[in-house]
Amino acid sequence: MHPMLNTAVKAARRAASIINRASFDIDRVKVTQKSHNDFVTEVDQAAEQAIIEVLKTAYPDHAILAEESGASSNLHDENDNVWIIDPIDGTTNFIHGFPQYCVSIALQQRGQITQAVVYDPTRNDLFTATKGAGAFLNEKRIRVSRRDKMADALIGTGFPFRGTDDLNEYMKMFKLLSEKCAGLRRPGSAALDLAYVAAGRYDGFFEKGLQPWDMAAGSLLVTEAGGIVANFSGESDYLYKGDVIAGTPKVFGQMVNLLSPFAK
């Protein structure tokens, strides 16, 4: 395993132990709305700090872009190495004890994602990839599924959850896709959804309005597993634009045809 990936795995496991410990206390803490939000914020922040500590110890001059703490001060000094971190992707699931959330860590070097870890602490599933070296689940090589017909495809997605998102537009996409595919799923963690495309558990995935830390690690998993990731127009600038389609080569093409009218 690449030494940088090894460090990221160590960081993800450290975060997962904090998340797992907290998950046993969720019911006790969920007394009022405020306290469970505070509780999750605490866990998010503690997990993120644990990740940053491990990465900074190994690579003190690398920059950080993380969901809770934002960008490190050296991010804009033309830093060639940026760690993109989501300590808990699927926080709403986590709050409810719904076991579908993960830790996502990626390294971006000169604009390219080169290392990726998506770790699901409830199933002990460790998805990893190094650019050019393939994608793995618990150290076994994974590849996207062989399905090529939309009618047979299981597709993952995420519903808009912010008040500002356009639910009407989303329902049009939802209807269009549900009529064409074998099933649509919406478990609530984009990073894990992308890992599932890489592992062949889904044949495709689409979502609008994502952040870089939702997609960075998952997108490398998909491409290293033989899939394609792009924006709704089929172009490669999805990471900081937020709209993404991922899938097996054939299913991806069919999804772009259906979803390109919804491109920004």
Image (tube, rainbow, N blue to C red):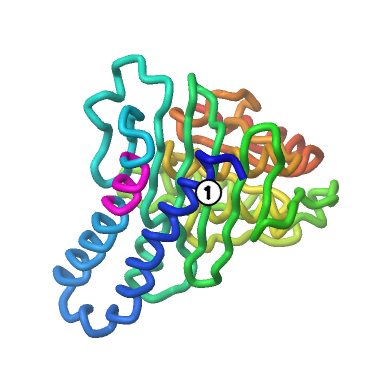
Quarter of the image for residue 92 reads bottom left
Label 1: how many Cα within 10 Å (few below 14, some 14–19, many 20+): many
The correct choice, above or below, for 70 with respect to 178 in the image is: above
Camera sees residue 179? no
SS majority, magenta: helix
Q: Which residue lies furthest to the top in this view?
A: 78
Q: Give whichever of 148, 194 is nearer the camera.
A: 194
| Residue shown at the point (76%, 49%) measured from the top left | 143
**Amino acid type, callout 1:** Val
| Residue shown at the point (55%, 29%) measured from the top left | 263
| Residue shown at the point (72%, 33%) measured from the top left | 257
**What is the span of residues highlighted in magenta in the rendered image?**
49-56
Expressed as whole percent of the image width and height from the top left, the position of residue 42 reads 21, 61
Quarter of the image for residue 251 reads top right
Report whether 191 appears left or right of 25.
Answer: right
Camera sees residue 144? yes
Query: Residue beneath label 1, please?
Result: 117
Expressed as whole percent of the image width and height from the top left, the position of residue 114 reads 56, 32
Expressed as whole percent of the image width and height from the top left, the position of residue 65 reads 34, 35
Expressed as whole percent of the image width and height from the top left, the position of residue 221 reads 63, 44
Question: Which quadrant, please, contains the N terminus?
Answer: top right
